[in-house]
Amino acid sequence: MLVPLINSIATTYHYTRPRALQTLVILVNQFLIPYFDADPRFPRNSHVGRIIWLQNLMKTRHGQSLMEKAVARLSSELSKDLEEKRRKLREFRPVSPFEWKDAGKGLRYYDDPIDGKVEIPENAPPRPAETAIWNVLSKEWVVVNGE
């Protein structure tokens, strides 16, 4: 019963099998178990009866709603995890208040709203301000916006 659900999730949401499995775990643990626990008739059914009940539920609008909630919950959890990883990366590797160092590669960088992640030469002084831009020709910081 669960393998077809994994396949359905993977196909419907264009997920990899591991991502579909993560969604299924959320669906079962956070939505289906509480749903079935709330119905006093469910425990009285045989194993086969429970599988049939689950199959029928997943065909209903409510079952699809539970699936969509599981997909949204996984998306939210993954976004939070990614943001936490980014925060930790920055928190534990600051070079100055305005730049960071990639621990794996040893490269210094700063975030630019236009150019994105900009590498800083190893021998450059610390970035003096949030709006400072590294000039590769003069090999010095240029502070923009009047700071």
Image (tube, helix red, strand yellow):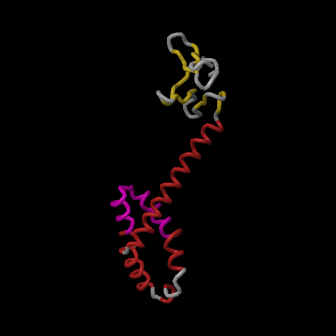
Name the chief secondary structure element in magenta: helix
* Residue 2 in picture, x, y percent from top left: 41, 71
Look at the picture and state if 77 lies above or below 135.
below
- Check the picture and name the quadrant holding the C terminus: top right
* Residue 57 in picture, x, y percent from top left: 40, 77
Q: Is residue 17 magenta?
A: yes
Look at the picture and state if 82 lies above or below 99.
below
- Check the picture and name the quadrant holding the N terminus: bottom left
Q: Residue at x 52, y 75 (%)?
A: 33
* Residue 105 in picture, x, y percent from top left: 55, 31
Q: Residue at x 55, y 22 (%)?
A: 120
Nearest the camera: 18 or 74?
A: 74
Total numbered circles: 0
Q: Residue at x 48, y 55 (%)?
A: 75
Look at the picture and state if 86 lies above or below 123.
below
Nearest the camera: 62 or 88?
A: 62
* Residue 145 in picture, x, y percent from top left: 57, 20
Q: Is residue 117 magenta?
A: no
Q: Residue furthest bottom?
A: 44
Q: Residue at x 45, y 84 (%)?
A: 47
Residue 98 lies left or right of residue 40; in this view the side is right
Give the magenta-colored segment's residue range. 5-28
